Amino acid sequence: MSFFTNFLLALGLAMDAFAVSISSGSTVRPFRLNDALKMAAFFGGFQALMPVMGWLGGSVVSTFLSAYAPWIAFALLAFIGGKMIYEALYGDPDGKVSSLSYSVLFLLAVATSIDALAVGISFAFLNTPILEPVIIIGCVTFFMSFFGAILGHRVGHFFESEVEILGGLILIGLGVKILAEHLLWI
């Protein structure tokens, strides 16, 4: 995968964490710069860790399913993207917290990085190297979460659902791209 594709994937995956950071930044009082750094470290770290875990697990079964890998990757990315869009439009507003304890940050980080686990499984099915995407995903999520928390503190949650919709569309688009590349090479 190219750097640009990895960057787009990272943007799509980081949208959940960005939306939760905006929401949390708007509700945590008193808000300090340290809060934004803690949020960014948790979200970026888990977004980098989960694809590795998915890749390791997916590598075990990928040899059995390699012929269907592009279809599985498409289905996973389309499902995750669709779920993000659905939750943005119809879901309950979650991720709003009044404090940033480590247990709350842990739960939010896991919840926002489940989709990254599925992406890691997709990487294993596609036999894609994991190091570069993981570094890009972790860094993009770190910076987006950091700035999202600060933005949330300053302007509230006016754009929270729009950000999640954009992330879902990016993930669906990447799934379509993977499938289209496979179909064009058949």
Image: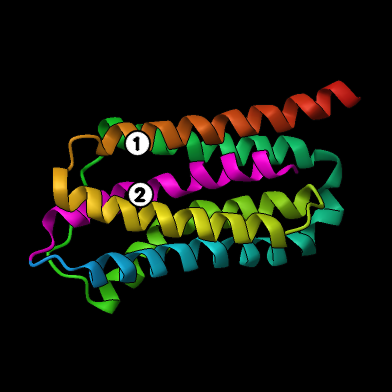
Q: Residues within 10 Å of mark 2 (few under 14, many from 20)?
A: many
Residue tagged 1? 163
Image coords of residue 42 (percent x, y): 40, 69
The image quadrant of residue 107 is bottom left
- The relative height of residue 186 versus residue 45 in the rendered view (above or below) is above
Closer-to-camera residue (118/102):
102
**Most frequent secondary structure within the magenta stretch:** helix
Q: Residue furthest right?
A: 186
Q: Secondary structure at mark 2?
A: helix
Closer-to-camera residue (180/138):
138
How many angstroms separate mark 2 from mark 1 (CA)? 8 Å
Amino acid found under the numbered disc labelled 2:
Phe
- Residue at image x 38%, y 48%? 16
Kindly identify which numbered label has been placed on residue 18: 2
Tell me which numbered mark, 2 or 1, is placed earlier along the sequence: 2
Image coords of residue 125 (percent x, y): 77, 50
Image coords of residue 131 (percent x, y): 71, 62
Q: Quadrant of the N terminus?
A: top right
Magenta segment, which residues?
A: 1-29
Residue 150 visible (yes or no): yes
- Residue at image x 71%, y 67%? 56
Using residue 39 as the reference point, say whether residue 128 is left or right of it: right
Q: Secondary structure at mark 1?
A: helix
